[in-house]
Amino acid sequence: MPSALFIDANLIVLLVVGLVGRDLIAKHRRTRTFAVEDYDRLSRAISRVGKVRVTPNTLTEASNLLAQHGEPQRSRLLLTLRALIEQSPETVVASVDAARHHVFPRLGLTDAGLLTVVSADAPLLTVDLDLYVAALASGDEAAINFNHWRGW
């Protein structure tokens, strides 16, 4: 059993939106592709492991995606993100190190940074197929494709 999970920006957005209000999942433009059951699956996965790890780049991307919503929910979303930030261990990856990762030209800074820190002990949970496949290069247990759980 892993000691923590890294989750991608899309799943951070789902987590935060669901924490603010399950009904908001269908209304936020960045979570409309998810169902309430997806939020429940994500919550269960996190509770089993007990700890979400984050990177500054993933948090920045999630913040930008969450902010694409009107008030008054926008402020509630960002305050909820702040609470998640306060309780999640943050792993800083220098941009120069992430940019040197071989996937950087294809996947960008945020994903390359994640790929420098994932492991079997702290795998990546993601909905992004390209990121998932790239993370598997670090080992079969370094990544979990959230889409495999959807529809169960």
Image (cartoon, helix red, strand yellow):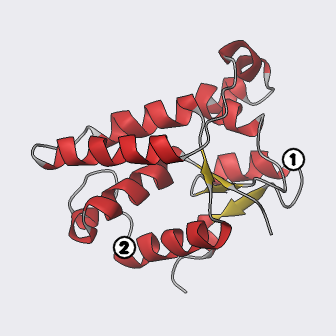
Q: Residue furthest bottom?
A: 152
Rendered residue at 72%/23% (across/down)? 98
Residue 32 appears in the picture as rendered: no
Name the foreground residue: 89 vs 73.
Answer: 89
Which of the 4 quarters of the picture holds residue 152? bottom right
> How many labels, in total?
2
Residue 9 on image: x %, y %: 50, 45
Of the residues under marks 2 and 1, which one precedes in the sequence? Answer: 2
Residue 139 on image: x %, y %: 89, 53
Return the mark for residue 137: 1
Check disc 2: other Cα within 10 Å, few if <14, some if 14-19, many if 20+: some
Task: Tell me the distance, in whole angstroms, between the alpha carbons under discs 2 and 1.
Answer: 30 Å
Q: Amino acid at mark 2?
A: Ala
Q: Amino acid at mark 1?
A: Ala
Rendered residue at 76%/18% (across/down)? 97
Q: Is residue 74 above or below residue 91?
A: below
Which of the 4 quarters of the picture holds residue 78? top left
Q: Is residue 13 shown left or right of residue 22?
A: right
Rendered residue at 55%/29% (across/down)? 56
Q: Secondary structure at mark 1?
A: loop
Q: Residue furthest front?
A: 87
Residue 116 on image: x %, y %: 78, 34
Name the foreground residue: 83 vs 124.
Answer: 83
Residue on which the image places disc 2: 35
